[in-house]
Amino acid sequence: MVLILLREVSCNLSLSFPRMTGPHAQRDQMSNSSSITQFLLLAFADTRELRLLHFWLFLAIYLAALLGNGLIITVIACDHRLHTPMYFFLLNLSLLDLGSISTTLPKSMANSLWDSRDISYLGCAAQVFFFFFLMTSEYSLLTIMAYDRYVAICKPLYYGTLMGTRACVHMAAAAWSSCFFYAMLHTANTFSLPLCRGNALDQFFCEIPQILKLSCSHSYLREAGLLVVSVCLGFGSFVFIVVSYVQIFRAVLRIPSQQGRHKAFSTCLPHLAVVSLVISTAVFAYLKPPSISSSYLDLMMAVLYSVVPPAVNPLIYSMRNKEMKDALWKLMTVCFFRSNKVPIIFCSAVIM
């Protein structure tokens, strides 16, 4: 239903803008995105051995992300002691990480394994929509998590009021719903553009800047303008996160206990590092000038903001957290004694 709706909106948007007239009009009409049935993604290597190496590397990263985020979701859902605002947002973050990495890696791995580059038109539209939706939702959620840590550390007496159950649900729902419609707008706008420069994308998944490169009409400027607005909103959120952490660090430095300072810093610094990585690489990928564009640079930036965060977030936010370790150990112990099929050595290895 989402794909059908996107295509209908795309057609409506394309009809709402005047088409060019003159000798080039017929060429652009034939090269419109509606005449393209598939796109060609970037091939990582020319030899079979290197393609298999790419497949196994991405498979290892994908399985690590599935295992880490899956464990977080399971533990938080099963342990009532973790039903707090911080872990509620962490559960949402893990869901978004699973969705975003599942949008890009499986198709790339399948292409490398079967020596193919093609992705269907609707498949490309789906990738653009879901990736943009999930990544912007994740960034919005990281902003909310920064606010949660600010209230918890700087205004602990108001924490129960400001971060109640209803307030947390409303903030998460607002992040998901607003980013859903925002991603639909970007996707419909992007795929309404006339494309006359082929169908080859210099990326391992469908990405808006790469699709804009295929457009030969000035209509792409409206999508570029939307991307600039998106970046400005993202930069505003980043400023909010930085200001929140400045206040947090000032409060932490006043904590007399060295253990308390260490716990606060170990929670906040990794969060700030992930946010900085995502926003810096995404801004560079979406707003860099064409003069410094190259396939290898675009590929490296895409991996940094689309593949690395979902894989390392479980390690940063959870596996170094004592409460999560205790809950995970309890869950695995229960599973071991009930089924008697899970080796205790495996449980210890996962927790360590």
Image: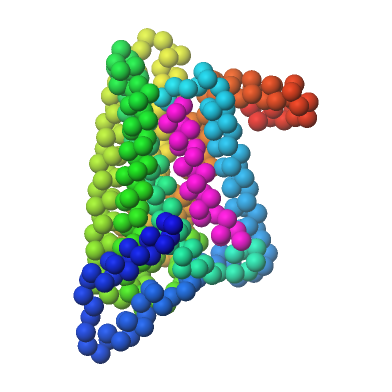
Q: Identify the residue shown where x is 37% and y is 61%.
A: 6
x 41%, y 10%: residue: 257
List x then y, in percent, for residue 149: 36, 25
State the extent of the magenta-drawn residues as a range: 87-110
Task: Check the image and name the residue furthest to the front.
Answer: 1
Q: Is residue 338 above or below residue 276?
A: above
Name above or below for residue 331 compared with residue 194.
above
Q: Residue furthest top?
A: 256
Q: Quadrant of residue 286?
A: bottom left
The residue lying toward the viewer, choosing from 227 and 36, is 36
Q: How is the image coloured?
A: rainbow
Whether residue 105 is in magenta: the answer is yes
Q: Main secondary structure of the magenta part?
A: helix
- In the displayed structure, 329 sits above or below 213; it is above
The answer to whether 228 appears left or right of 279 in the picture is left
Q: Position of residue 197 (x, y in %)?
A: 38, 77
Q: Nearer the viewer, residue 234 or 71?
A: 71
- Quadrant including the C terminus: top right
Q: Position of residue 200 (x, y in %)?
A: 46, 72
- Quarter-wise, where is residue 150 in the image? top left
In the image, what residue occupies the spot 37% across and 56% down? 285
